[in-house]
Amino acid sequence: MSSVWLGIALALAASLALNLGYLLQHGGAATAPPVTPRHPVATVSGLFASRVWLAGLGAGLTGWALHVLALSHAPLSLVQAFVAGGLVLCVPLAAGALGHRVTTGEARGVALMSLALAALSLGIHARPHSAHLPTAPLAAYMALAGAAAVALAVAPASPARRAATLGAAGGVLYGAADLAIKTLTDIASRDGAAAVVRSPWLAAAALATAGAFFCFQRALQTGRALPVIALMTATTNAVSILGGLLVLGEPLGRTPALAALHAGAFVLMAVAAWMLAPAQAALAGSDGGRQPQASGLAGARPPRSGAVRSSAAQPTSRSRSARSAAAPPLKPNSRFARSR
């Protein structure tokens, strides 16, 4: 039991680091050269040239390491649920440290997420490591996830939706990688580190992670952080939790009542995560406050930022005589000042 609770604590810490890392990477990627797997060296060099992106990379790697440790102590489905539940920690951080005013929807999301986490914590137990590795089902599931990610990445989409499809593709691959990593932690606990190095699932996890990296970074570069991160997180959790239940045989609960309770809690987690997604935008607005146009964010309410930019763009389309007048350009800016 203590091992499972340690895994839960590590999952929450991982979530906080990962979400902060995603937002910093969004700000840094906006000023980097286009992210493309056709030019991996140029892509990585351009991202590494941004200090903001490097800070996000450091936070993300820290979160990833904590995530792997969590997977070695707790079931995959439980870890992924509490990684999503880490958004609960983002809201007080945004309110206290960053001065973000918590909205009614975010407050309800915190309450709903807390209720779901409390339900998941009832009757949790560690799954004993099985001597039998479900090789064929795992390979089939990984292949299906890879095919789905490729279909999303190459599917025809309008420029407005391209970032969303790439974010979803990255989430599918990250979810598949998490499933492979969970398998590797089971192998390490049973057969030692040498068996992990020889395992084909190490290469599978690395390949899925690399593909997810390019998809997600390009989505962050071309889209708004809020929907991209929310969609990537949702697909990652869906793919990994479903894989843990179907492939690894992780039970929902030791009794039918607990299984029903935990199934309902997973549904609440998905709803609450979507309600809490604006808290991520609050963090991004504080990090990107110096360069709101570069990062694509202008504070805790992204929809308003588009309106402000369009209002600010109106004077530029007028004649020089109209632009020289002081009154018309001041009206959009004054409304923007009041809206903040």
Image (spheres, rainbow, N blue to C red):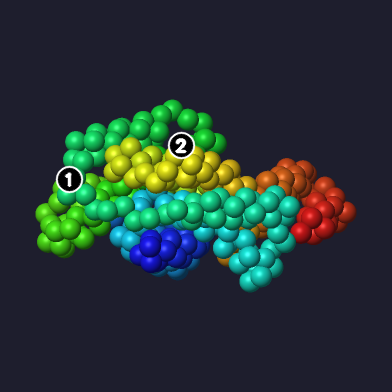
> Left or right: 39 with respect to 279?
left
Rendered image quadrant of residue 167? top left
Residue at 82% of width from left, 58% of height from top?
Answer: 338
Q: Which residue is mark 2?
A: 165
Q: Which residue is mark 1?
A: 132
The quarter in which the C terminus is drawn is: bottom right
Residue 262 percent across, percent down from the top left: 48, 45
3 lies above or below 264: below
Decide which of tag 2 and tag 1 comes sooner along the chain: 1
Question: Which residue is the extreme one toward the top?
Answer: 156
Q: Secondary structure at mark 2?
A: helix
Question: Which residue is the extreme one toward the bottom?
Answer: 97
> Left or right: 5 with respect to 113?
left
186 lies above or below 268: below
Residue 213 percent across, percent down from the top left: 36, 50
Residue 144 percent across, percent down from the top left: 30, 33
> Left or right: 275 with respect to 211?
right
Label 2 to label 1: alpha-carbon separation: 36 Å
Do callouts 2 and 1 mark residues in contact (Cβ within 8 Å)?
no
